[in-house]
Every structure is written in structure tokens, then in C-alpha cells.
Amino acid sequence: MSSKTTDEKRVRFSERRSSVRVRSLLPCAVRVIDESEIPKLEARILDMAVIESDSVLHDTVDWSERSDDLPREVIFVLNEVRALRQQITEIQRLVERQGEGAIEPRWVVINDRGFRVTTTEDDPDMQPGQFVEVKLRIPSIHNPDILAVGEVVRGDEKSTAVEFRAISQLHKKAIIRYALRRERQLARSGKYPSIRDND
């Protein structure tokens, strides 16, 4: 098999992974924004990515692997510090959520490129070309709270489609992981129609 064929297969597999989309009931809020607000939101997205990447890094560090280099007491203290950092990060998330108010669950069809959300009576009138702030919460340990800038690409009285214009790579990967896990779960649950989503 030529390297060109192998490369083409890898590209197709990568495209399939990133195009997997799922329909799910997720906490979601969409707010129409002015183009002048985008730089401020992009800064917040970047800050969230920095905090979360740091948290993931500390979660994956296992100080016991360095037991030959460090005394047991030092390893114990480092592990305690890591646990405290995780708790502080979770408290920060809870405080931020309280300050922002509740995000109502909405039916969304989502992948790492964008999403389609069902329209409700409370939604503002969203027209193609408008920019929106997107807040989304997915079932994930490391990256549950997603913030992104999107652009409305189409909409009608039933739903609105949005493409992501600014989103961190961490959050894109978290969406892909969630979509793949949920797709696998739906495939396993195929013989139980009562727990499948209605299309």
C-alpha cells in the first residue's frame, strides 16, 4: 500500500471523526452580539483554554512515577496540592455558573464545526450573518463548559443553524469526544427504542 493511499485514508478518517454529530438535550444559551464584542469574547475563550489546559495537565501528572527522585513526603504534599487545585477549579466553575444564572436545556444537533438549536418563543430574531455568543454545557469531566463565537448561517421558525467562528481546540476536541461516545452509546442501545432520540 502506497503512502499516498495511507495518507488519504487518514484524512478521510479524520474528517469522519470531526463530522460526527449528535442530537442531545444540553444546557445551551445563544445571545446575539455586535461584531465589536468579538475580541472581548475571544480573550475569554483563550483564558478558559489556558485554565482548562493547565487543569488537565495537573490531572494527568502522577507524582508517584517519580518516587525514585523525590522523597515520599514531597510526593504526598504535591498530590495534596493537585487535589486542592482541582477543588478550587471546580469551585470557580460553580461560582461562575451562579453568577451567570441557569442555562436552560435545549435540543441541539452538534459537532465540532457548529450546531443547530431548536427555536423557542423567548429567542431573539436571529438572521444569517449575525454573530452570537454561545454557552454550552456537555457531559465531560475536564471541559464541560464551552464558550464560543458563532455565526448564524440559516434559520426558520423551528431551528437556527450556527457555525463556530471562534472556539478553543480543547473545546472542539471535547465536543468530538462527546459526539463519538454518544454515537457509540446510541448504537449499543439500538434494540431499546424507548431510549433513542426521536429524529
Image (tube, rainbow, N blue to C red):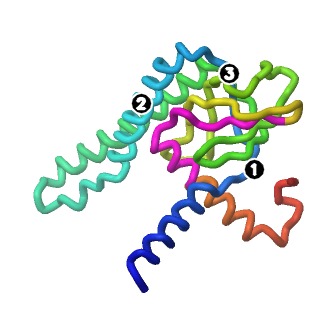
The residue indicated by pointer 3 is 31
Q: Is residue 162 magenta?
A: yes
What's drawn in magenta, residue-wise? 159-176
Q: Quadrant of the rendered structure where residue 82 is?
A: top left
Which residue is rendered at x = 12% and y = 62% of the image?
Answer: 68
Rendered-image quadrant of the N terminus: bottom left
Which amino acid, by three-letter code, is at mark 2? Leu
**Dot 1 amino acid type:** Arg
Q: Position of residue 111 (x, y in %)?
A: 63, 48
The residue lying furthest to the bottom in this view is 1
Question: Please, is residue 145 above or below residue 41 in the view?
Answer: below
Q: Left or right of 32: which side holds 81?
A: left
Residue drawn 75% across and 24% down?
127
Q: Amino acid at mark 3?
A: Arg
Q: Residue at x 83, y 55 (%)?
A: 197
From the viewer's side, name the closer residue of 144 and 129.
129
Of the numbered discs in the image, which one, if any, rests on residue 65? none
Crowding at mark 3 (Cα within 10 Å: few <14, some 14-19, many 20+): some
- Identify the residue shown where x is 17% and y is 47%: 74
User: Which x, y percent locates residue 42?
Assistant: 47, 25
Residue neighbourhood size for the residue with mark 2, other residues' Cα within 10 Å, grouped as few (<14), some (14–19), many (≥20):
some
Dot 1 alpha-carbon crowd within 10 angstroms: few under 14, some 14 to 19, many 20 or more = some
Q: Which residue is mark 1?
A: 23
Where residue 22 appears, x then y in whole percent? 71, 53
**Location of mark 2 (residue):** 46
Helix, strand or loop status at disc 2 = helix
Q: Is residue 194 left or right of residue 46?
A: right
Q: Secondary structure at mark 3?
A: strand
Asked if the residues shown at circle 2 and circle 3 are in contact, with their CB atoms under 8 angstroms apart, the answer is no
Vertical side of 156 occupied by 59: above or below:
below
